[in-house]
Amino acid sequence: DADVTQTPRNRITKTGKRIMLECSQTKGHDRMYWYRQDPGLGLQLIYYSFDVKDINKGEISDGYSVSRQAQAKFSLSLESAIPNQTALYFCATSEGDKLRDTQYFGPGTRLTVL
Amino acid sequence: QKEVEQNSGPLSVPEGAIASLNCTYSDRGSQSFFWYRQYSGKSPELIMSIYSNGDKEDGRFTAQLNKASQYVSLLIRDSQPSDSATYLCAVNRNNQGGKLIFGQGTELSVKP
């Protein structure tokens, strides 16, 4: 089984709908991240969490919210989806020295907002 | 100016050649540097990390760091078609440990 899983893998939704993307990990890592990737723009950090009680905004948090339900689970919500949130979303985890840690990515969720 | 910049490519090299991928960063206080490989439709995976000036070699891959010039590169020797992917440069800034800033990625195509 994969160490970092994301559900759903693909989602098509309509403008104005609320949706949730879920991330689960079995690596036992404290730190978890949500990124979005648009063609030609690399990865942009949406939210990150260093432990269950520590959640922080990233570069592009507007329009998104998160919930860290447990060490192993980190969910991303779009309260009212809009077409420019169409993108590939990745969850990642890490641990250890914050300056030298390796981030491990989930398989991604492809979201389309019509 | 973007914090981390890469040439988007595509960079095309023949099989067996050396592929050279470049990355510049703007924050002089950056401490750690990473290269991730991402195949089309897949998630990024770490292939190299470097923390000190100079070269770091791992198999066919060599990462080079020059903090004075704020420049980090990745060399791939004996390039193979299976190396065809997008390569993402990522930087971890000194005062924001645990957060990575990614470049836009360079698409590499290795032609048989």
Image (cartoon, coloured by chain):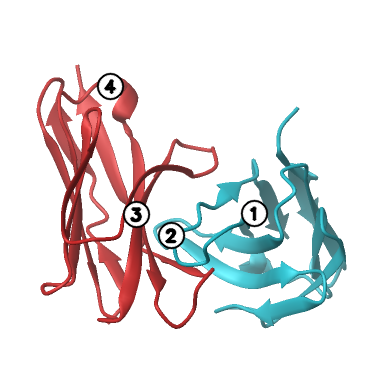
Chain colours: A cyan, B red
Element carrying mark 1: strand
Q: Quadrant of the N terminus of chain B?
A: bottom left
Outermost residue on the front side: it is A97
Q: Which residue is mark 2?
A: A42
* Label 2 to label 1: alpha-carbon separation: 18 Å
Q: Earlier in the sequence, mark 4 or mark 3?
A: 4
Q: Which residue is mark 1?
A: A93
Q: Are there few (<14), some (14-19), or many (20+) residues within 10 Å of tag 2?
A: many
Q: Amino acid at mark 2?
A: Gly
With B3 as the anchor, is A38 left or right in this view? right
Question: Which of the 4 quarters of the picture holds residue B94?
Answer: bottom left
Element carrying mark 4: helix
Q: Are marks 3 and 2 on the same chain?
A: no
Q: Which residue is mark 3?
A: B105
Q: Is residue A42 above or below residue B101?
A: above
Residue at horizontal 82%, vertical 53%? A72
* Label 2 to label 4: alpha-carbon separation: 22 Å
Q: Percent x, y for residue B58?
A: 27, 34
Q: Are marks 3 and 1 on the same chain?
A: no
Outermost residue on the top side: it is B112
Q: Are there few (<14), some (14-19), or many (20+) residues within 10 Å of tag 1?
A: many
* Label 1 to label 4: alpha-carbon separation: 30 Å
Q: Is label 3 in contact with label 2 (beta carbons under 8 Å)?
A: yes
Residue A81 can be seen in this image: yes
Question: Which of the 4 quarters of the picture holds residue A53?
Answer: bottom right
Q: Is residue B96 above or below residue A19?
A: below
Q: Are marks 4 and 3 on the same chain?
A: yes
Q: Is label 3 in contact with label 1 (beta carbons under 8 Å)?
A: no
Mark 2 belongs to chain: A
With B96 as the anchor, is B80 left or right in this view? left
Mark 3 belongs to chain: B
Q: Are there few (<14), some (14-19), or many (20+) residues within 10 Å of tag 3?
A: many
